[in-house]
Image (tube, grey):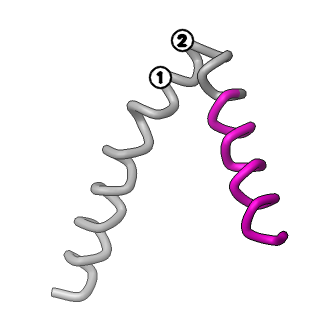
Amino acid sequence: IYTYEILLFSGFIISCLIPLVIVSFREPEWQTDVLKEIREEIHRSTH
């Protein structure tokens, strides 16, 4: 059961990551926009 749960969890993560990777390769500017937003959020939370 334990190994099956790990397999299921890793499969779930992979299925979530694959579309993100495809989108980031197809639209590089989308990736930079997200990174910019994350940086702004970090900056906002620290101050």
Q: Which residue is mark 2?
A: 26
Give the percent coordinates (x, y) of residue 17: 44, 43
Relative vertical location of residue 26 with respect to residue 9 in this rendering, above or below: above
Point out the residue furthest to the bottom here.
2
- The residue carrying pointer 1 sits among few (fewer than 14), some (14 to 19) or many (20 or more) residues within 10 Å by Cα, namely few
Magenta run includes residue 44? yes
- Mark 1 is on which residue type? Ile
Name the spot of residue 31 as percent of width and height, x first. 64, 28
Q: Left or right: 6 with respect to 20?
A: left
What residue lies at 30% left-to-right and 55% top-to-bottom?
Answer: 11
Q: Quadrant of residue 15?
A: top left
Residue 22: mark in rendering:
1
Q: Seen from this angle, which residue lies furthest left?
A: 1
Q: Look at the image and give the residue range highlighted in magenta.
A: 33-47
In three-dimensional space, the C-alpha distance between marks 2 and 1, rounded to whole angstroms, equals 6 Å
Question: Which is more toward the observer, 18 or 3?
Answer: 18
Task: Residue 42: give x, y in percent of width and height.
Answer: 75, 60
